[in-house]
Image (cartoon, rainbow, N blue to C red):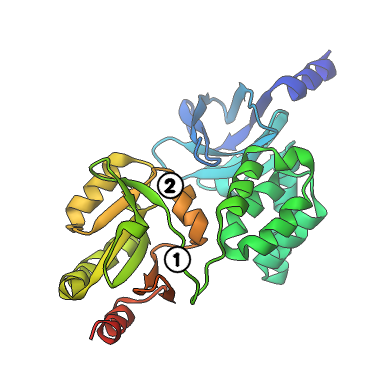
Amino acid sequence: MHTAILGQQKKHGYVIAGNIYWYPDSTLLYLDEISGDSGGHLDSTYIIHNKFRLAGSISEDAIQVMLRIASTSDFKFFWLENAPIGFVAEKGNLAGGRITGSKTQEEYDQLDAEIKRSGKELEQDSLFILGHPNSVLSASLLRINCFVWGKQITTQLYVGLSEKIRYSANGREILEFIRLNKNIKTGDKYADFEQTDEEGRMQRLSGIREKVILLAFWGSWCRPCREQNPELLKIYNEFRDRGCEIFGVAADSRKEEWFRAIKEDGLTWTNVTDLNGDRNKAVLIYGVSHFPSNFLIDRTGAIVAKDLTADALRNKLQEMLK
């Protein structure tokens, strides 16, 4: 009877059960989804006599989740599947706890061990993808690394995935990157696009008619971006009357936070977003792998420099706007 119940659970849903030692009875334990943009609270329970149990179901084969103790920084990330999942840990060290029953988590642990052994994360990620075409983890790794690997390598790895994985949520995002990315390099002509500004108006990059345009990628959530903004504002005020304009693209998903950052930082140049976070279409087109990032465009429409620091940008503008 017990075996039949476990088999049914594995087919139709998950049960996470185990021991977390040394927390007092009635300590609250949360289960949160952290996969992609669909993160959210899944369930909660209390630890009683060092034991806990959570149950439910997921629509994907596997998703990334976090077990966490309420009001603490004690947590564990892992891959959840519709299966009986075991977990054993101690107070203050959920991260070091052991997960059993999730095939995807086993794959992740094996990959992590290889990365620590070799010290070559990107190489091990690519080898894993090549060797595991039907793994949810392969699609997740490719989605994360596509900006670093670029269009050509991403395409080669994508076509090697199984049909099921290519049509998964991560697979569809990888395909969107391949479809949109222009593999833009210094010396290439800029790629045009349009998005919405804070007034709700569509603004097109090609609509900027100045001699020099700095296409600046940032986000309200990005501390280095926010720290750079005051100096960027000084440069803008220094050169805008000489023919320089900034076209800011925010990798934001929450309009209110984007509005607040523009106001707090006093940004007076054109700012746009499509509210798709780091999956912003312009981010995909330009293959932006980090924030802040920028592309300097001259009067002919050519990309003349990328990822300029404030000092390098000032020097370049002095040279171009004599």
Q: Nearer the viewer, residue 229 or 49?
A: 229
Q: Amino acid at mark 1?
A: Tyr
Give how far across and how far down residue 155 sits, in percent.
70, 57
Image point (68%, 70%), residue name: 120
Which residue appears at 22% of the width and 73% of the height? 243
Q: Can residue 222 be seen here?
A: no
Q: Which mark is residue 168?
A: none
Residue at disc 1, secondary structure: loop
Quarter in which the C terminus is drawn = bottom left
Between marks 2 and 1 in the image, the one whose residue lies nearer the viewer: 1
Mark 1, other Cα within 10 Å: few <14 / some 14–19 / many ≥20 = many
Q: Residue 191, image x and y in percent? A: 46, 61
From mark 2 to mark 1, how far is it between C-alphas?
22 Å
In the rendered image of this protein, does residue 305 appear above or below residue 125?
A: below
- Compared with 239, 148 (above or below) is above
Q: Is residue 209 left or right of residue 185?
A: left
- The residue carrying mark 2 is 277
Residue that mark 1 sits on:
190
Going from the N terminus, do you reach mark 2 or mark 1 first?
1
